[in-house]
Image (cartoon, helix red, strand yellow):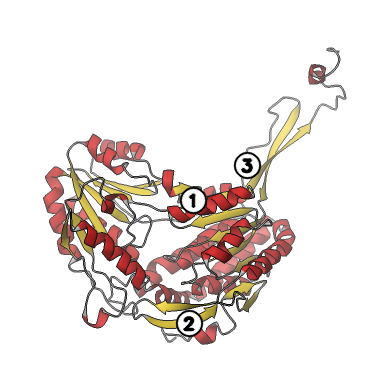
Amino acid sequence: MDQRFDVTERFAQGAQFIAGELRAGTSGRTQDVTDPATGERAYTYELAGTADVDAAVEAARQALPEWAGATPGERSDALHRFAAVLDERTEEFAYAESLQCGKPIKLSREFDVPGSVDNAAFFAGAARHLEGKAAGEYSGDHTSSVRREPVGVVGSIAPWNYPLQMASWKVLPAIAAGNTIVLKPAEITPLTSVMYAQAAREAGIPDGVINIVSGAGQDAGEHLVGHPDVAMTSFTGSTAVGKRVAELATATVKRLHLELGGKAPFVVFDDADLDAAVHGAVAGALINTGQDCTAATRAYVQRPLYDAFVSGVADLMATVRLGDPFDPATDLGPLISHAQRDRVAGFVDRARQYATVVTGGEAPGGDLAKGAYYRPTLITGAAQDSEVVQSEIFGPVLVVLPFDSDDEGIALANDTPYGLAASAWSRDVYRTGRAVREIKAGCVWVNDHIPIISEMPHGGYRASGYGKDMSAYSFEEYTQVKHVMYDITGVARKDWHRTVFGDRG
């Protein structure tokens, strides 16, 4: 298959997928999908407007009774078929993801796509295990049981950094639990989300269960969150936008799940394996060109290892190969857009006034100049309260700071508003055990940074949001828990009635 497959032909009917059909948006405005590696337009489509959101929500509402009424086994079978269809299309999805995002093809092939296939396979099994507390006579006179029921129509909003994986994280737990969904991907990266919904239809998932509206946040997104027929909103994105989503959801008392920004600390104690920590820091900081809310962004290194760590990271960053995303040898692709590259460059340029840029800190020239590339960047000498330490940069930038005592290292790790992910590096099980307990984050890795698995939850503390993606824990977001209580005595006049009328019999 040609890696530059004809997107315009593939999406000739538009980039909206509603009630099982590909269609054009009705907002009257268009949006370009741009290849970040070249700056060239790959596709132009009509954005969704509020009428398209209404149509998608209505399609989801109409599909809800049948899908919610299906047995767990029937939903599981459909998801197994879906996983199989995705598995057959891995190359197609990898090429499309790299085209719209600028990801190196090896990242799309080895991380984004197989992770999404695995998510589908996991939720195919999990659909049969919507568990609750065991039925029992907890009052003595009644048998109690717990039902898990779908929330209803879910309206989800996904970001541009991992379009395919975020579609998976939003769609799969929702539909496995019996809900239907309207997903709004980022308008600059709609391709794989639409392809994902098309694959679900080919797998036999009924029309209307999964709908995609590709539109701008301020109209399509806000209309979806505020829609009266949407029972729940799941949003992944920046903390600032998450606050706006929460305001809109509160107006209609919706269930709300937020996965927001991060500023992950990478804490290296003085007994750590230095070589492992250096390699882990470079990989953790540069994955997806640093456009990852769990990326290692601020390394705290105990002073005996600090100089060697900085030197090792700088040397390793210098070996990272920037290039064409479709070249299998490329390590680092461009940022999502020139605007994002300029935003990252702004953070680094301002940091020069108070810190040292050890390596990187510039866009490459030559053949890469027309793309949104930025070199891997290492910064030292920044203060804990400085912008590059406290703010989410979302680019290939790592800031390294020293610390002395373990108390100080853990305190510094917790000293931002965020709490999504973190890692601790040490050979001492008691040291890492303390770090795991005391670092305030939804995920703490020990002697590694970044790996995720379908069986385990992903979600944050504090300004990083609340609720979980992936794993069986995600069903807490996408199900209503109902207590059912049966009288087992057959007695007409209950003893407790006397508290309302009459005397004890």
Q: Residues within 10 Å of mark 2 (few under 14, many from 20)?
A: some
Distance, label 3 to label 2, CA atoms, is: 47 Å
Location of the N terminus by quadrant is: bottom left
Q: Position of residue 497 (x, y in %)?
A: 82, 20
Amino acid tagged 2:
Tyr
Q: Earlier in the sequence, mark 1 or mark 3?
A: 3
Q: Earlier in the sequence, mark 3 or mark 2?
A: 2
Q: Which residue is mark 1?
A: 243
Picture quarter containing residue 76? bottom right
Location of the C terminus by quadrant is: top right
Please give left or right for residue 297 compared with residue 359 in the image.
Answer: right
Secondary structure beneath dot 1 equals helix
| Nearest-to-viewer mark from 1 and 3 | 1
Which residue is at 35% across, 67% downward? Answer: 340
Q: Earlier in the sequence, mark 1 or mark 2?
A: 2
Please give left or right for residue 123 compared with residue 461 in the image.
Answer: right
Amino acid tagged 3:
Gly
Residues at discs 1 and 2 in contact (Cβ within 8 Å) = no
Q: Which residue is mark 3?
A: 132
Q: Which residue is mark 2?
A: 43
Secondary structure beneath dot 3 equals loop
Q: Position of residue 421 (x, y in %)?
A: 37, 49
Amino acid tagged 1:
Lys
Give whichever of 20, 143 is nearer the camera.
20
Q: Is residue 39 above or below residue 319?
A: below
Q: Is residue 465 above or below residue 323?
A: above
Is residue 194 shown to the viewer in this render? yes
Distance, label 1 to label 3, CA atoms, is: 32 Å
Give whichever of 279, 215 is nearer the camera.
215
Q: Residues within 10 Å of mark 1 (few under 14, many from 20)?
A: some
Q: Position of residue 18 (x, y in %)?
A: 64, 72
Q: Is residue 481 above or below residue 458?
A: above
